[in-house]
Structure formats: structure tokens, C-alpha cells
Amino acid sequence: MSFFDTVLLRLDESVTGLFGQWNLWTSVIFTVFAGFLTWQIAARRDPDTHPFLLARQAQGSPVRQPGQSPVYRSQAAPHGMPLNAGLNVKDAGASKWSRGRDGDLRDIWRQAVAGVQEDGPTKGRTGRILTVQGAQVIEHRLDAITRQINLIGQHILNQGGHRVAIYLPNSVELIVTLFACTFYGLTPVILPFDQPDDAVISMLRRSAADTVVTAPGSFPFDLVVKSYPSLRQLIWVVDEGSKHMDWNEVPQGTGSSVNVSTWQDVINDGPVDAGKDLPPLEGQKEPCDITIFWQSKPGQQEELVRFRSANLISAIAGQLFAVPTSQRMGPSDLFLPADSLANTHTLVLTLTALFSNASVAFNSVASQADDLAIATRGVSPTILVATPAALLKTHKEASARTNASLFARFLHRRNVNQLNHGGVMPTTATTGTATQPEDTKLRLILTAERVGAGTPRLSSAVLSDLRAFTGARIMYALTAAKVAGAATQTGFYDYRVFEGEQGGGCHFGPPLTSTEIMLRDMGEWKSGDDGSRGEIIVMGPCVAGGEAALGVAGVMRVDNTLTYV
């Protein structure tokens, strides 16, 4: 018998012996093993981003000056290239190969009305503007909002107004007034809402406002006209249930120096065909500065900051580039600001959503409650701006629900493991989204640390839990008074957890493409061969004055992301 015949004979005996001993337990073991192997192969997913991109998220300048660290920039804005300062707005008829204008705030609304310009299935689509009143959702036509922008701007200008204080909760009227000021050469002053009477009067004096747009019941009219004689014009934004009342009456003893009108009267008294077209672009000057009040802590005087239109435009451009191209906002998104629009971070993100032709929902109670269930009632947002306090409350409630179920705890641990070790977002949330249990559309949450405001810190472990609970990615930013938008922001695909490291396992990501960061020696915190530490200095076109010292000490981690010392 040849060698080949011997091999075949032994193989035949082995196969015959194997199947001769096959029984029920063998079938069970084989089925389990084959199923596990198949599941491992089929369910395997590559990380959402390459680990090397997370290992070094910013680049320092090759040279540093004495007493300070290298200047750190985003990898998308290398040294030697200008920081992102514009939106590349192309006028009608311009070649698609030509470089567009940087643009200003007026181009935000022009883009919102024009719709998507790029070729594709969404070309020409526009977003919707919604107002949420409890369970009722009201949709506003874009042409009706354009008419309001024109009529309100013309009315304020005709009455001699120049500096317009906007004292409103999150609402369509706030955005309309802001755009009305930019189109008609007025200076908008955005006041934090629901402030004590003396704080409101102080902000009016410091901003030298001559016009106020506000809502009844929140603005101390009698006290203001007696304590602030420079007020010349007041526009009430009256709700539907109070339209029948006479809101044009001036308190006794004030004379006729204050011209009082209502928003509805200004709109309804204008001709039907008036204000349908925006003012022409040619021959218009750059919009006036935007005045913002930064409130650090309750009881402290607000810091007045004046931003140029170019500062906000640069911040918007930075936010556009902070999100990967395939994940950017678009007409299919519903954006909900659940933080006050008086914060430049929230305002910049809202303007970014309008420029991206996403739908935007305004809820007047969203900015006053640290409860996402209340803020999202009536709508199912895909992108949400929330405060750290609201996210911590959501984390606490979702953790309690998860701990009550053995299966939910198992699913949550699996999701967290996928995030931390696999680098991929789970396909299903642990408990549905924390905002609405049946909602499965939420895909992005944006939140921010306010320097010096005492906002609660969000550790990387809490952020990881929130991603697993909600099924949404989270971007955590560092914001400051003189920085429009964000100074730094965590990456879209950064799901890592750091326990017991610098900053308590918390970091605020690398600079955006519109900022650069430098750490200046501050007391015991100095930069050297062992790392970069010191007072955080932010520079860039989105910074008021070009440079801002934040007054707090920071450190650059080994992955070149910023955190507190």
C-alpha cells in the first residue's frame, strides 16, 4: 500500500470515528461555537476614527518664547496657514472655482432662506423654524420671518433707535431682532434673561441702549423709565392671550419720551407687500458690533463684551469644520438650543444650524430649566445644546433606571465597553434617549464649561455613560467671555475615558480651526521639558480683540488636549 493510500485510509477512519461518536451534546457544543464565531465576525466594527488621530489632536509651534508654552493649533489648521475666519460665501453668478467672501451675519439668514446650494439630493431644501409652546408646535414660514426682520428693523430705525437691547427668552423674536439689527445698521445688545431689576438697569446703562425689545411680565418698565432716562423706545412681544390689552400706555410721570409699541402692531400695521425682500447686498457696510453680557456667577456683575460680526462668523466657521463632513448639520436635522441664546456658545451653534439649513426649534423654557425632559417636550431633536447641569441630572436619572434592571446593566456595560475599547458608538442606546424614551433620533449633544462660572465638571466617565444612555455623540467645549463660540472642543469621535488623570479625568479637547492656545507661566505653573502649564491664553479671529487671557491655569495633556491643572 502506497503512502498516499495510507493517508486516505487513516483520514477515512478518523472521520468515521468522529461521526460515529456524534450525539446531542456534540451538536449543542458545535452549534454554540459556530454561532459565537459567526457573531464575532459579523458584529465586528472598525473604530469610528483611527487611534493615531486621537493620540495627538493638536500640534505645537516649533519654537516657544520664554515664559510661555508653544502655540497649539488644530491639526486641520497647521502653523503657517491662516486660521479659519470666513464662511466662503459665493454670490450668485460667481464661479464655483473662485474663493468666496468671509461673509457676515446677514449671510446667515440669506443662506437659510436660499436653501442648500451644493448639488445633490438636498439641493434647494431649507430648514424649518419652530416655536414650542408646551405640547403645541408652531411653524413659522421663512418669508414671514423675513418680513418681520424688515419691518422691525425699519420701525426701530425710523423711531431713531441705534442700540437695541434684546431681553427675551429663547424665541424666534430674539433671532428676528438680531437679524433686523444686522440688516439695518443697528447695534444689538443681548441681555441674559430673567435677571433682577437692578441688574437689568445696570446692563442698560453700561450698554447705553436706547431701545428695548422684551416681553411683558419680565421687564420692570416703571422702574426702568424712572431710573434710566435714556430709554427712548420699547417694543413689547405679547403672547396670543394678551393681545386684547392696551400695551401702548406709558406710566404716569414719564411724559411721552418713551415710544411704546407692540411687536404685533408693528407687523400688522405694515403694508401686506412690504418687507418681503431683504435689503440688497451691494453698498452695505459691515454690521455693527454685537454686545454680549457674560455672567460668571449669580450675584456678580456681568462682564460686557463687544464682538464684531467677523468674530461670530469665524466662530461659526470653526464649528462647521469641527464636525466631519459626513456628519455635518443639514436639512434632515432638528436643532434645539436648551441653553440660553445670551451665551455666545449657544448663539453661535444656533447660527451655525441656520447657515446649514437645519430646522431650528425654540422653546422659551428651555434656557431656564436644567431638565432635558422639559426642554425637549413636544419635539424630537437630532442635535441638542445642553448645560452641564442638565446632563448631570440626566445621567443621575438614567443611572437609576439602568440599575433597576439586570438586563439594562448588562446592555449598558456592553455599550460602554464598545465606546471605550472598541472606539465605536453603540447601535442601540441603553435606555433610549434620556430626553424622550421613545426617541431614537438624537445623534449629537453639545455642551460647554464656562470659565469662572462655576459650572459643574463633566468627567470622561460621565460623558461615556451619557453616550451609552442616549445613543448620541457628545462634544464638550471650553468657553470664555471674550471668545465667540468655543476656545477648544472635544473631537466628534473621541470616546475615551481617563480616570484619575489631570483635570479629574476631564478634558476640553484641542483648539478649533478658528483659535490657537498658548499657556503663559502663572505662579507655580510653568512650561518646560516636562510639559506645558500656565494661564490659558486664547488667540484667533473669533476672539474679541484678537487675544484673551482666561485667568485660569491649564495644562496640555500628552495627546495635546486642554484641561485644567
Image (spheres, rainbow, N blue to C red):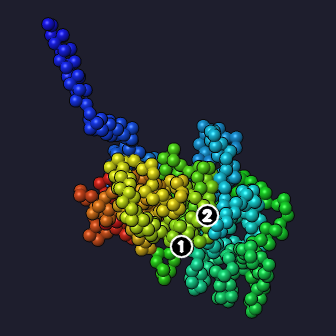
| Mark seen at residue 199 | none
Q: Residue at x 72, y 63 (%)?
A: 149
- Give how far apart the Cα atoms at labels 2 and 1 are: 15 Å
Q: Which residue is mark 2?
A: 378
How far across and down, in percent of the image, does residue 515 sit?
A: 45, 56
- The answer to whether residue 487 is seen in the rendering is no
Q: Position of residue 257 (x, y in %)?
A: 76, 84
Query: Residue 273 is drawn in which quadrant?
Result: bottom right
Q: What's the amino acid at mark 2?
A: Gly
Q: Quadrant of the N terminus?
A: top left
Q: Residue at x 69, y 49 (%)?
A: 114
Q: Foreground: 350 or 232?
A: 350
Q: How many marks?
A: 2
Q: Is residue 539 left or right of residue 498?
A: right
Q: Residue furthest bottom?
A: 253
Left or right, 1 with reference to 85: left
Please name the residue shown 71% across and 60% down the image.
140
Tell me the residue that label 1 is attached to: 369
Q: Quadrant of residue 344?
A: bottom right
N-term mark: 2 or 1 = 1
State the image quarter where residue 212 is shown: bottom right
